[in-house]
Image (spheres, rainbow, N blue to C red):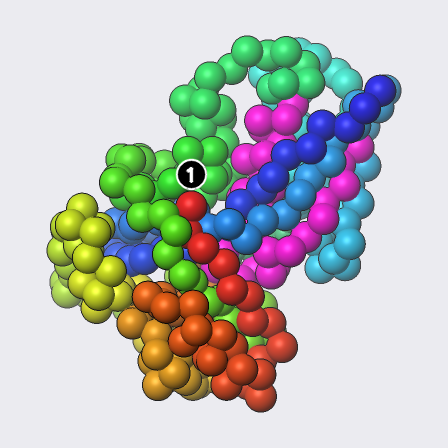
């Protein structure tokens, strides 16, 4: 029995506005999400019973808290099929980094099991199932560029913002999503998400870079000034714009020129060990 290989891509938030907290504890957002080509590779093999999760990264949980586990359990419950799975996660997306690494692995698992068990579920059905496991899972199934509303599950596809040079820099701190949300001050002031969308529609890279925004960034920078240091190093070295992605701490810079990106990579070496060039896809 061979392996089924699924690539599991990360995301950045070009803009992330947080509107309010719902009674169930989730936050309503207005965000433009963008897939990047930084990816984990997941290898799936059928086994008789249970689930075995392996990874090259010790930070990845191997138990029922892993979104891979949750996705398998959910599809078992929905389909009534009780078969086991062995999953090997080759992790490249930094963990708890604001890049949706866990959600993306959960999405990949829904897609893999759909194939292995011949469930014939559509992407729309998988997105509905995924939303109960994690708010970013529907986007990880859809990919591309999208406006995410609700808790992230209401998605509107946008004009693709592909092939842009992005530099990721992670200061090596883990920030949980729940912690980052707890630090946000919910005010009346809104980010201009429509403006950012119009920049994407006009394919105006400078305009996109000037209209990046993340409501979680200021409170997280107050605690971790290194994030601001990374941002300013990127801007001083030629990035058109730089922002913390999602709940952080990863910062991404947008470039119109690969040489400036490589120049920044060199400048950041003294600040952080985790520096990853990638592209939007
Ligand atoms: P998001 O941007 O969706 O909020 P994130 O990129 O900040 O997520 P993840 O890498 O998804 O963060 O990890 C958050 C937590 O999820 C980790 O601390 C880890 O314990 C847990 N987790 C569950 N499944 C996975 C997985 N497959 N890979 C990595 N972390 C996982």
Residue 224 appears in the rendering = no
Residue name at image x 60 percent, y 61 percent: 94
Magenta segment includes 108: yes
Q: Is residue 182 above or below residue 266?
A: above
Q: Is residue 52 above or below residue 219?
A: above
Residue 99 in view here: yes
Q: Position of residue 88 (x, y in %)?
A: 76, 41
Which quadrant is home to the N terminus? top right
Q: Can residue 70 be found in the magenta stretch? A: no
Secondary structure of the residue carrying tag 1 is loop
Residue to which mark 1 is pinned: 143
Image x and y of residue 225, in percent: 44, 85
Question: Is 178 left or right of 211, judged from the image as shown?
Answer: right
Q: Quadrant of residue 79?
A: top right
Q: Residue at x 58, y 26 (%)?
A: 111
Local crowd at mark 1 within 10 Å, few (<14), some, or many (≥20)? many
Residue at 55%, 76% (x, y): give it: 171
- Residues drawn in magenta: 86-113
Please tell me which residue lies in front, 135 or 57: 57
Q: Residue at x 72, y 48 (%)?
A: 90
Q: Position of residue 190 (x, y in %)?
A: 16, 61
């Amino acid at each position: 029995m061979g392996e089924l290989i699924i690539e599991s891509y990360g995301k950045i938030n070009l803009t992330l506005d947080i509107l309010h907290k719902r009674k169930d504890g989730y936050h309503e957002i207005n965000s433009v999400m963008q897939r990047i080509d930084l990816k984990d590779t997941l290898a799936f093999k059928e086994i008789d019973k249970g689930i075995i999760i392996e990874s090259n990264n010790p930070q990845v949980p191997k138990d029922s808290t892993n979104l891979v586990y949750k996705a398998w359990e959910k599809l078992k419950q929905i389909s009534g099929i009780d078969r086991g799975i062995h999953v090997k996660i080759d992790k490249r997306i930094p963990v708890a980094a604001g890049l949706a690494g866990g959600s993306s692995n959960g999405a990949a698992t829904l897609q893999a099991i759909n194939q292995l068990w011949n469930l014939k579920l559509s992407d729309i059905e998988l997105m509905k199932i995924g939303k109960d496991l994690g708010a970013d899972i529907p986007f990880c199934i859809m990919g591309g560029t999208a406006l995410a509303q609700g808790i992230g599950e209401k998605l509107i596809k946008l004009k693709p913002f592909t092939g842009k040079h992005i530099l990721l820099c992670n200061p090596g701190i883990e920030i949980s999503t729940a912690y980052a949300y707890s630090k946000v001050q919910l005010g009346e002031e809104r980010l201009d998400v429509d403006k950012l969308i119009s920049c994407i529609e006009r394919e105006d890279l400078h305009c996109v870079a000037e209209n990046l925004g993340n409501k979680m960034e200021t409170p997280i920078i107050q605690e971790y000034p290194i994030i601001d240091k990374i941002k300013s190093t990127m801007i001083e070295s030629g990035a058109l714009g730089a922002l913390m992605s999602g709940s952080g701490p990863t910062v991404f810079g947008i470039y119109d020129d690969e040489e400036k990106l490589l120049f920044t990579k060199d400048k950041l070496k003294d600040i952080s060990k985790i520096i990853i060039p990638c592209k939007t896809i």
